[in-house]
Amino acid sequence: QKVYKSQGVDIHDKHIELIVRQMLKKVRVMEAGDTGLLPGELADKTKVERENGKLKKNAERATFEPLILGITKASLATESFLSAASFQETTKVLTDASIEGKVDHLLGLKENVIIGKLIPAATGLKRYRQISIGPSDSVPAHLYARPDTEAELLAALQEIGGDGDGLDLDALGLTFGGTPGSENGGSEGAVSHEAGEAEEVPEVDSPLDEPTS
């Protein structure tokens, strides 16, 4: 963190903790005991502890020593060969994976993004995929009804009429140049045009019409 802060960059502790966890997650098996591990095998610490937990009380447990891997080695030593191939040494990682017959179970985020599947995080976790979301209780219909408001609206619509003849525009302060139903709109100076006739527009001389030499 001192390196980042010396350059004026503030970085939270959780980011450093994530990197350190990836660097310390691998161990080397010293003695396999009664487990199915191999001596000298590089494995996750959680995997070795899980194998030891499966043994009976009198069985010999596997012993291991912790390792500190660099960022590059830690990224290449991941269980997912898709994730490792997307980082560095793509050809070598894919060749080794094909020779060893590895299977990627798509447990991480990066490999799911590469394949185009939903990432196993938040609502994408496996335990949330089979949950059906719906209302807990049915809401009674009378809670949505508003009898007073509906009665007022129906009375207003009946008073206005279906074609709006009963609507008083003058009382509302609205004017549209005449009264509904009149041929000329009720205004004195209005000019009516028959259907199919167009008003003649006078020609205007434009300087663009003059011939150019």
Image (tube, grey):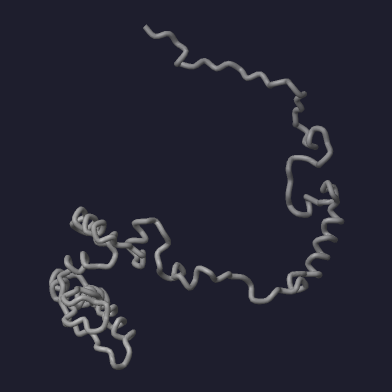
Q: Residue at x 22, y 55 (%)?
A: 95
Report whether residue 114 is seen. yes
Compared with residue 49, is residue 196 higher up or lower down, i.e. above or below?
above
Residue 196: x %, y % from top left: 74, 21
108 sits left or right of 63 in the view: right
Quarter of the image with the C terminus in it: top left
Report whether residue 86 is seen. no
Quarter of the image with the N terminus in it: bottom left
Q: Residue at x 29, y 78 (%)?
A: 47
Residue 127: x %, y % from top left: 48, 73
Residue 139: x %, y % from top left: 71, 74
123 sits left or right of 5 in the view: right
Compared with residue 176, is residue 158 higher up or lower down, i.e. above or below?
below
Identify the residue at the far top of this view.
213
Q: Dividing the picture into quarters, in which one does residue 75 lie?
A: bottom left
43 sits left or right of 213 in the view: left
Foreground of the two, 79 or 33? 33
Q: Dividing the picture into quarters, in which one does residue 150 lie?
A: bottom right
